[in-house]
Image (cartoon, rainbow, N blue to C red):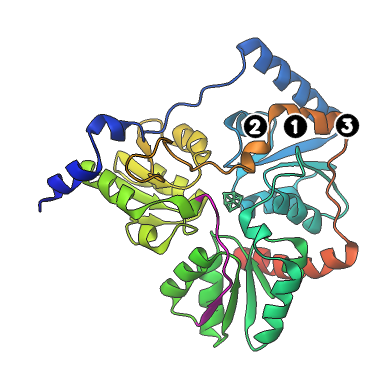
Amino acid sequence: MTQKSIVAETVDSRSLVQAHFAEPVVPQYSEEELQAWRDRIKRLLNEQNAVLVAHYYTDPLIQALAEETGGCVSDSLEMARFGAEHSADTLVVAGVKFMGETAKILTPNKRVLMPTLEATCSLDLGCPPDEFSEFCDQHSDRTVVVYANTSAAVKARADWVVTSSIALDVVDHLDAQGEKILWAPDKHLGGYVQRETGADVLLWDGSCIVHEEFKAKGVEDLKALYPDAVVLVHPESPAAVVALADVVGSTSQIINAAKTRPEKRFIVATDQGIFYKMQQECPDKELMVAPTAGAGATCRSCANCPWMAMNSLENLCAVLERGDNEIFVDAELGRKAMIPLQRMLDFRKG
Ligand code: SF4
């Protein structure tokens, strides 16, 4: 069977695949409404000496506002670093709960607010501190490396905290010292780290509900129609999808690859929120969303984190007006969690 006939069986037409092209971001407000929200939030940020720190997966309107107001739009490692080094009294963290907690652990003297306290993460939810601690006790000969997408209590139990942009380097470093690793919570990222470094890695069974949905078959079909397209994959995706990647990397590394590579087309397997920054950084390139649904599915793509999407201009404004949704971390827990976090920041500098 030729490649073309395989495609014909699984993808009805080129026009169906066109649906995967990333669309320009369409604001859900009129220009006047949008301006009113912007002005109100800017004034509040100014009055409270506050800075907005937003993740790439949040609403593009929030990302744009963070940029306009001297805040930061980035991945979780850079968000942590930016918040810790910024002179503002208040950090407003638009993202999910572990990001607010991380900011508070790193800067306990600052006020940390979040637009919503309901926004969590399947990786954090899937790694309850008590069960995780028991798992660590059962494997006490291993160095505990946890992903940033975890609660303060899980971080406090770890030797190292890593983000996806630094995970390979840290595990490589530990492996070179002969250390065996206990990895949590994302099994896909952990599996990728294990394959790449050859380290002895014991995996916790967690996953990201967004990245887990990417389908290797869908990526193959899209790639068959666009053989010139470069496949960019976040390592929280399943191994079969990672195996099809030209570049595997964190959100920042994915953006950088699209920006610096000479090719014009990219298939991107990560949350669609990233397209705001990618379109801004490389306006001349064609960006396609990696398929998440099988043939016949009615949704275009599920690559949208439901928790990241809970951040809005409304609740961002409300938290600045009311001062609620403040993040608190128990001082002793924060002190313990700070040790593996600081280790990561120092490693990055070194
Ligand atoms: S995209 Fe996945 S890893 Fe990121 S916050 Fe959402 S559930 Fe967690």
Kindly identify which residue carries mark 2.
62
Q: Is residue 319 above or below residue 211?
A: above
Kindly identify which residue carries mark 1.
316
Q: Element at badge 2?
A: helix
Q: Are marks 2 and 1 in contact (CB under 8 Å)?
A: yes
Label 1 and label 3: CA atoms lie apart by 10 Å
Kindly identify which residue carries mark 3.
322
Image coords of residue 82 (percent x, y):
69, 48
Given the current orientation, which residue lies at the most extreme left position? 1
Q: Are marks 2 and 3 in contact (CB under 8 Å)?
A: no
Q: Is residue 202 left or right of residue 23?
A: right
Q: Residue at x 30, y 52 (%)?
A: 217
Q: What amino acid does circle 2 point to? A: Ile
Q: What amino acid does circle 1 point to? A: Leu
Q: Which residues are magenta?
A: 200-210
In which quadrant of the rendered view does residue 335 lie? Answer: bottom right
Q: Element at badge 1?
A: helix
